[in-house]
Image (spheres, grey):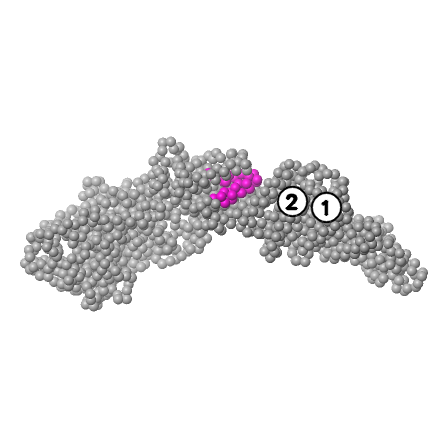
């Protein structure tokens, strides 16, 4: 504390507990209840008392001098009224002037022991006031006290009506109270003058105490007043610096340097401050009682009594309470007659209640204490209000008035001199609790109530700093950084122990015992009183008033389940704080007067939209230049705030808080898909941050990190707006809407800065390319900021997120340019060559993909890098397709440019697969890349096969390249894995086998000579045809392809037959061909099924063709294939009949006879069917299915 404390100074003599049963804790001992106990047993009544000296300015205790008998106390001693080091700094006050307690003494103590106020302590007061309260049932004298509530603590101060009314006649203050007092309470009351006897007794006591100081009585030099107060004032300075909140601020000058503070006695002038626990009541008490000690009596209190006047109950209670409060185990009483010392008597503290003529029950005193505290706590419920506890002289009725409410009925609420000290104390207690806010969230409700009451009491124009600081603290109570955690942690705030119950409960509790201190006795007297104790005798009844444990302040913390509600509350406090700061800054004459209700015109919109992406580049360069200058600490304020002033520091904190609140609001709107609203909020967050940057002299790294996060979110919003262009009107409406609160905050920001630093990022454009570019620039700016102050290594998670987003937006822009190039290509006339515009779009797209790949690779994101490599491959294929259109369609050949781009595409797909490593890392991406790679190889092979570059390459080389490409395509085409893509893979593989078989078939037809090669081609053609058939048979939606392959196989058999010479060989080949024909039955059944489904659909259903599940089934194609099939079947049957007939002539064979007969019958039916031109398609298919069934049963299968 900075003061000398009496280590053990107030401890009892050794063995005190053993002698008298009273255990008194010394300063050095624990404040927690101990096993030794601290109980005093008196006449069977148990009273617990414990006192701990928190602070003492008294010098080491001096032994008292026992005066000789017959010493005349009327004669002054040599050292009378002279300063003495033994008396300590307040010696003259205690022993000489007998100056009475100051009207704000409890506030001085509360300021010094701010930790105890509002939470641990029930009462803070001068010991004289405590004694006066506890003597109410025994005394006829008047009681007048001011009561203030701070949290659960009550501050009690003497309210000297005589002094107030004297002052009122001079200054005009308190006139309303004087009128009220004279009208309702004591019309005849006059100021009573003290008697001569009173002053005579004071003088004798003073001389007696000076005589009793052990020593030669000579005057001793003592430190000057400044030195005396050194420790105390240094403590207060430490307190005001250390316990101030928020951290960047000193205690506001209006608190620490208030000139009225000293005149009002806001200093702690007590010699010692004691934490006294009486039963279950915790009190912080100030005492000036002189304590002597030394030799046989380490701690005694010294009293002077007139031997002719017996000790009464009031005196006994006085002495007993003084000794309990100050931990003094014994009382030394000096008796005199007319100032002549007679004798000394030593009395133990616990024996005082049993003295003759001064007999009182300690249990009753305990009950009085509990009842008075309960009465005050249950009725002094409003923090910041001044209550007046009053008992008229000789009256049994105690009344409690709310002076604040009475004062509000007058014109000036600041007439109440307690207003300022109460507000300051509310603020200080809140500051102190705020320092520990993370330790216990249950105090949030208390802090909020303290601050709201503090703000309510103060005049905004007189105390802007405290109001600004209080509003900032209020905003700090709401956790913006962790909205989700915050919501889950709010419920305990209302559930835990003693800090929260609802207003309704409080009112109900009050009404329970209304009869005890109701307003029913005399309406003319009572209608202004808050509560009344009808008879002081009630205070002696045990638990007449409610137990203090049931009386708690109503400090529930508002539960904001909604993020927007919480942020709006924070912004309302921020706005009030900003208003206070702005009102305190002297308005410059050249500062334009702006109406907060009028939106500020924004002049930057045209520039940014006109400039497009190129304009963005310039704005980004300016922004980065500004960021660099911030590192050097450039300062610019339009309002003329002085750097380092409280206004400057406070406004910085408030602006930063508003930017955080707007950021959280924007994030919440983003999650609700309200992108226009989200952009409006992030714009306000960035405008707040821009103003912060203008004011800040030393940019903190955490603030730069906030900026990076804001820009990242802004990039996200711009991207989502680009992707939701169809709802643009609604987003625009949300973006342009502004609340009055937002306008006023923006008005305060514009006092310091034009707020245009981030205009490039927060514009709502209608152009897709512009939105994507802005989004990308936001991420780039966020990334640039992370390069400052080594933020990326301190925040690796955020850095990774920024790079991921940069990679993603570059992919989006790359795809955008790629799609534009593809659109241009589709619009181009076939024969035209590639345009410059297309090539420019390719370059832009390629550049974006390349940068995006680099972003993902730098954070080891293999999956996303693979996806971008895949997209680059797709771009290469678009480039290849663009080149294929050039030239004459009839002379069309596969060009070298096409080959180049397709090979580049293959390279990128292979890189993508290498990036992934294995399929396990990301199966879906792996399968997708594999499919694209297979498609590229297949497209290349198909184009080379269909548009063979014979002008440049030999047929054999082309065939070889086609074969290789097809086999590579087949390798990357996974037909076995069950997936949504499996049918596609099977179709692709079947098509590859079909194309290869056709190619080898064609080679075989055209090739002459090399028999080995011919044989090889024959085997390959046969192999690929059979594989193609197997795969097509697995598919239900490719009957035409299956039919075509089978027909080609039949043609292949016919071609083989032409080179055969023997009838047996030809018959065998024919039999095989007919067998293939029989197996086409499956294809015809599929075709028939689809045709039937088509016919069954309602004719009127226009959507039927679109809903056709197999758009590949073309009627023309079916008819064409059907005609070919009929002619080939007819030809094969005829050849079979011819060959079987010729062999029959040579040799008889029963089996062949059966086949011949069957074939003739089938051939006959086929001829009749084909001759009937009126048959429908379905009928023709039905005939063929029937004939194929017959052929299967009795046809040529046997051969």
Residue at screen point 39% across, 55% down = 493
Instruction: Return the residue at label 1.
Output: 943
Name the residue: 87% across, 59% down.
1065
- Neighbour tally class for label 2: few under 14, some 14-19, many 20 plus, Cα within 10 Å: many
Numbered mark located on residue 876 in the image: 2
- Label 2: element kind: helix
Furthest residue toward right = 1145
Frontmost residue, 129 versus 1146: 1146
Residue range (magenta): 757-785
- Pick whichever, 937 or 765, lies toward us: 937
Q: Are marks 2 and 1 in contact (CB under 8 Å)?
A: no
Magenta region's main secondary structure?
helix
Instruction: Say whether residue 526 is visible.
Output: no
Task: Check the image and name the residue furthest to the top.
Answer: 590
Asked whether residue 471 appears in the rendered view, the answer is: yes
| Mark 1 surroundings: few (<14), some (14-19) or many (≥20) residues within 10 A | some
x, y percentage for residue 620?
Answer: 50, 39
């Amino acid at each position: 504390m900075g003061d000398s404390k009496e280590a053990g100074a107030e401890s009892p003599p050794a063995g005190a507990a053993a002698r008298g049963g009273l255990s008194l804790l010394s300063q050095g001992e624990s404040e927690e209840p101990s096993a030794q106990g601290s109980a005093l047993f008196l006449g069977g009544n148990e009273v617990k008392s414990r006192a701990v000296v928190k602070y003492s300015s008294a010098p080491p205790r001096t032994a008292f001098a026992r005066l000789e008998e017959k010493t005349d106390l009327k004669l002054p001693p040599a050292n009378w009224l002279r300063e003495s080091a033994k008396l300590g700094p307040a010696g003259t006050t205690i022993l000489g002037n007998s100056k009475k307690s100051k009207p704000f003494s409890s506030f001085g103590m509360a300021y010094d022991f701010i930790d105890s106020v509002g939470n641990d302590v029930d009462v803070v007061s001068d010991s004289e006031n405590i004694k006066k309260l506890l003597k109410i049932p025994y005394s006829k004298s008047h009681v007048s006290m001011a009561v203030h509530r701070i949290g659960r603590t009550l501050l009690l101060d003497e309210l000297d009506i005589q002094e107030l009314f004297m002052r009122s006649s001079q200054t005009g203050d308190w006139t309303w109270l004087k009128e009220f007092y004279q009208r309702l309470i004591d019309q005849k009351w006059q100021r009573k003058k003290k008697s001569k006897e009173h002053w005579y007794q004071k003088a004798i006591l003073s001389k007696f105490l000076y005589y009793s100081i052990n020593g030669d009585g000579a005057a001793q030099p003592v430190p000057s007043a400044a030195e005396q107060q050194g420790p105390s004032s240094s403590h207060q300075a430490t307190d005001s610096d250390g316990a101030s909140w928020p951290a960047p601020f000193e205690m506001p000058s209006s608190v620490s340097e208030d000139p009225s503070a000293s005149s009002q006695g806001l200093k702690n002038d007590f010699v010692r401050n004691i934490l006294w626990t009486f039963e279950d009541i915790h009190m912080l008490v100030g005492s000036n009682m002189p304590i002597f000690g030394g030799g046989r009596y380490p701690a005694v209190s010294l009293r002077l009594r007139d031997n002719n006047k017996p000790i009464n109950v009031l005196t006994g209670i006085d002495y007993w309470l003084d000794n309990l409060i100050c931990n003094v185990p014994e009382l030394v009483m000096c008796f005199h007659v007319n100032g002549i010392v007679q004798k000394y008597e030593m009395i133990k503290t616990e024996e005082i209640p049993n003295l003759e003529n001064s007999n009182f029950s300690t249990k009753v005193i305990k009950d009085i204490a509990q009842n008075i505290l309960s009465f005050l706590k249950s009725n002094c419920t409003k923090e910041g209000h001044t209550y007046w506890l009053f008992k008229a002289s000789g009256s049994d009725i105690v009344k409690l008035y709310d002076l604040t409410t009475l004062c509000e009925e007058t014109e000036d609420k600041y007439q109440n001199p307690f207003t300022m000290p109460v507000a300051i104390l509310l603020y200080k207690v809140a500051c102190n609790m705020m320092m520990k806010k993370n330790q216990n969230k249950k105090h949030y409700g208390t802090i909020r109530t303290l601050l709201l009451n503090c703000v309510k009491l103060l005049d905004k124009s007189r105390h802007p700093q405290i109001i600004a600081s209080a509003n900032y603290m209020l905003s700090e109570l709401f956790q913006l950084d962790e909205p989700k955690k915050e919501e889950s942690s709010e419920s305990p705030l209302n559930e835990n122990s003693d800090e929260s119950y609802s207003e309704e409960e409080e009112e109900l509790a009050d009404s329970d015992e209304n009869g005890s201190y109701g307003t029913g006795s005399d309406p003319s007297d009572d209608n202004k009183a808050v509560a009344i104790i009808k008879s002081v005798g009630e205070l002696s009844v045990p638990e007449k008033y409610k137990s203090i444990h049931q009386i708690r302040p109503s400090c529930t913390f508002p539960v904001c389940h909604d993020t927007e509600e919480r942020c709006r509350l924070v912004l309302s406090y921020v706005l009030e704080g900003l208003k206070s700061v702005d009102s305190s800054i002297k308005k410059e004459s050249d500062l334009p007067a702006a109406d907060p209700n009028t939106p500020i015109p924004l002049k930057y919109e045209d520039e940014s939209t006109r400039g497009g992406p190129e304009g963005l580049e310039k704005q980004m360069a300016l922004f980065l230049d500004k960021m660099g200058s911030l590192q050097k600490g450039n300062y610019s304020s339009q309002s003329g705030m002085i750097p380092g002033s409280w206004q400057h520091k406070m406004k910085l904190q408030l602006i930063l808080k508003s930017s955080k609140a707007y950021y959280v609001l924007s994030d919440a709107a983003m999650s609700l898909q309200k992108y226009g609203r989200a952009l409006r909020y992030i714009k306000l967050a960035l405008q707040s941050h821009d103003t912060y940057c203008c004011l800040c002299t030393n940019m903190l790294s955490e603030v730069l990190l906030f900026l990076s996060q804001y820009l990242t979110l802004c990039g996200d919003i711009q991207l989502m707006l680009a992707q939701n262009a169809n709802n643009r009107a609604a987003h625009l409406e949300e973006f342009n809407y502004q609340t009055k609160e937002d306008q006023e905050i923006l008005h305060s920001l514009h006092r310091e800065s034009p707020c245009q630093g981030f205009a490039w990022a927060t514009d709502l454009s209608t152009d897709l390319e512009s939105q994507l570019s802005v989004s990308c620039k936001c991420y780039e700016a966020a990334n640039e900021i992370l390069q400052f102050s080594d933020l990326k290594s301190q925040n690796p998670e955020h850095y990774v997120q920024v790079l991921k987003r940069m990679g993603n937006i570059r992919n989006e822009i790359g795809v955008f340019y790629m799609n534009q190039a593809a659109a241009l290509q589709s619009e181009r006339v076939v024969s035209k060559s590639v345009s410059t515009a297309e090539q420019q779009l390719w370059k832009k797209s390629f550049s974006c993909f390349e940068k995006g790949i680099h972003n993902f690779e730098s954070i080891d994101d293999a999956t996303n890098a693979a996806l971008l490599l895949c997209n680059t491959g797709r771009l290469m294929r678009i480039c290849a397709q663009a080149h294929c259109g050039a030239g004459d369609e009839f002379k069309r050949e596969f060009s070298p440019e096409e080959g180049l781009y397709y090979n580049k595409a293959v390279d990128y797909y292979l890189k993508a697969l290498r990036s992934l490593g294995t399929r396990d890392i990301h199966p879906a991406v792996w399968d997708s890349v594999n499919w694209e790679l297979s498609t590229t190889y297949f497209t290349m092979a198909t184009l080379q096969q269909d548009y063979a570059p014979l002008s440049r390459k030999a047929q054999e080389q082309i065939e070889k390249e086609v074969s290789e490409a097809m086999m590579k395509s087949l390798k990357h085409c996974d037909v076995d894995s069950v997936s949504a893509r499996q049918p596609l893979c099977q179709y692709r593989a079947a098509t590859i086998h079909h194309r290869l078989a056709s190619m080898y078939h064609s080679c075989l037809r055209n090739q002459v000579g090399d028999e080995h090669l011919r044989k090889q081609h024959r085997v390959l053609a046969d192999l690929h045809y059979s594989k193609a058939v197997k795969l097509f048979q697995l598919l239900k939606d490719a009957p035409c392809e299956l039919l075509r392959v089978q027909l080609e196989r039949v043609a292949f058999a016919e071609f083989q037959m032409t080179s055969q010479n023997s009838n047996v060989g030809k018959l065998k080949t024919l039999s095989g061909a007919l067998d293939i024909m029989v197996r086409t039955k499956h294809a015809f059944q599929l075709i028939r099924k689809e045709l039937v489904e088509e016919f069954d659909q309602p004719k009127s259903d226009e959507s039927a063709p679109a809903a056709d599940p197999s758009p590949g089934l073309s009627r023309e194609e079916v008819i064409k294939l059907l005609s070919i099939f009929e002619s080939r079947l007819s030809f094969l049957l005829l050849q079979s009949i011819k060959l079987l007939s010729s062999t029959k002539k040579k040799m008889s064979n029963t089996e062949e006879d059966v086949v011949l007969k069957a074939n003739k019958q089938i051939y006959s039916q086929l001829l009749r069917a084909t001759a009937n031109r009126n048959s429908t398609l379905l009928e023709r298919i039905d005939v063929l299915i029937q004939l194929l069934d017959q052929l299967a049963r009795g046809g040529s299968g046997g051969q």
